[in-house]
Amino acid sequence: MLRYRVGVLVALLLGTLCVSKPAPASAADDVCRSGSLSEASVSASVELNDRHRTQTKVLSRLTVHVPTEWPYATGLLLGKDSEEYRRAMRCLLRSEEGQAQWWGEWRSSHPVITSEKGGVRVQVDTYGWAERQGVLYVGPWDIDIGTDHWKVSLNPPALAQARWTSVTVKPGTSSILSATPRPSANDDDSGLVWRRKPGQEMPQLSVRLDPPWQRSWAAQQERLRFYLTDGTASLTWQWSTAALLLLGVRRMRRSGPLSPGEVLPVRAATWWAGICIVLSLLHIGDNVFYTVMRRHVDEGTWADRQAHHGLLINLALGWILFAFGRPRRLTIWLAAVVLTLPGVVVALSPRSFGLTANAFLAASSPDKAVLALFTATGC
């Protein structure tokens, strides 16, 4: 009977994951008019900061002098929540074909916008963490994280025809295997430096790196061997807890017939041992599930659904624990249903509360959106 219940509840949880199918992302219109940015002056730098860190922190800085001839230059001077500002920044920092959100990119501060003679100066500082294989997009940089080697490439499509003054790559503790084109300078303080002559376009820059094995291993979190190694410690203590519960149950039953007051505690201990084992396997299994999804579904569309998935998964896990508890009072069941409703309503209709379609908080979300999301997650 216990095995049947566990099987049914696990199937319910997996069904929740499968039903939440990601929606396709819509393509952005070709509206950036990058030809008007040919007179822009650009400099860029990237630093792989890995000293005294488990994982490598990728720091990017992009500085652009945008000419007034660019149709969206004036939008940069508006408020950060205005559509004109967002459109201009998307064009400078993203490609025209893919305007998807970059989940690996972070900012510690807003871009610095300064009005100058003949245009607008934009300085954007971003960073990301090299924590798994694949391409990490940070500012104008593509960091291709491989099994053994990494490759740093410069790839801002809208600024490809602009006038580039300097480009800097600081590799940190990684060894430089190759760099194209040939850099103008190379020193310990500045790293690799490319200085362009006036009027030259963006260099087709590519730097191949050999990171220390510690940083390379720390950037393989999505690989199965990493999950197995990292999950062993978690499984050890969780399964040890389950083993202790089962050992206690065995000794209780061997000591003689159980009294009426001991039957339920012994049965509950047996159930909780099974719960520990099932949840520990689900903890590792979800990593495998996400790995498979990244290989077969575009990461941007899948990552967009994380908040939506989180609400439904937490509700399913809560009901698994609740069903194993088997409360006998009707009021407790009614309370569980009431506490479930906020999460279900927010997950099914996030726009009604001012959230995005994927149940995220936007910068312009009203107060009721914050209240709704915190209520749903709290319940």
Image (spheres, rainbow, N blue to C red):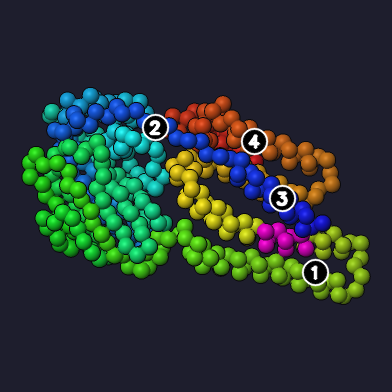
Earlier in the chain: of badge 3 and badge 4, it is 3
Residue 276 part of the magenta segment: yes
Q: Mark 4 points at which residue?
A: 344
**Residue 16's x, y, as percent?**
63, 43
Circle 2/circle 3 CB separation < 8 Å: no
Q: Mark 2 points at which residue?
A: 27
Residue 139: quadrant of the picture: top left
Marks 4 and 2, Cα distance to the nearest angstrom? 30 Å
Circle 1/circle 4 CB separation < 8 Å: no
**Residue 168's x, y, as percent?**
19, 52
User: Label 3 crowding class (10 Å Cα cut-off): few <14, some 14-19, many 20+?
Assistant: some
Earlier in the chain: of badge 1 and badge 2, it is 2
Q: Which amino acid does label 3 sit on?
A: Leu
Q: What stretch is highlighted in magenta?
A: 270-278
Q: What residue type is labelled 1?
A: Val
**Residue 151's x, y, as percent?**
29, 56
Q: Marks 3 and 4: which is nearer the front?
A: 3
Circle 4/circle 2 CB separation < 8 Å: no
Magenta span dominant secondary structure: helix
Q: Can residue 357 be seen in this view?
A: yes
Secondary element at tag 4? helix
Q: Marks 2 and 3: which is nearer the front?
A: 2
Q: Mark 1 points at which residue?
A: 249
Q: Is residue 183 left or right of residue 154?
A: left
Q: In this view, does 99 lie to the left or right of 283?
A: left
Q: Mark 3 points at which residue?
A: 9
Q: Which amino acid does label 2 sit on?
A: Ala
User: Label 1 crowding class (10 Å Cα cut-off): few <14, some 14-19, many 20+?
Assistant: some
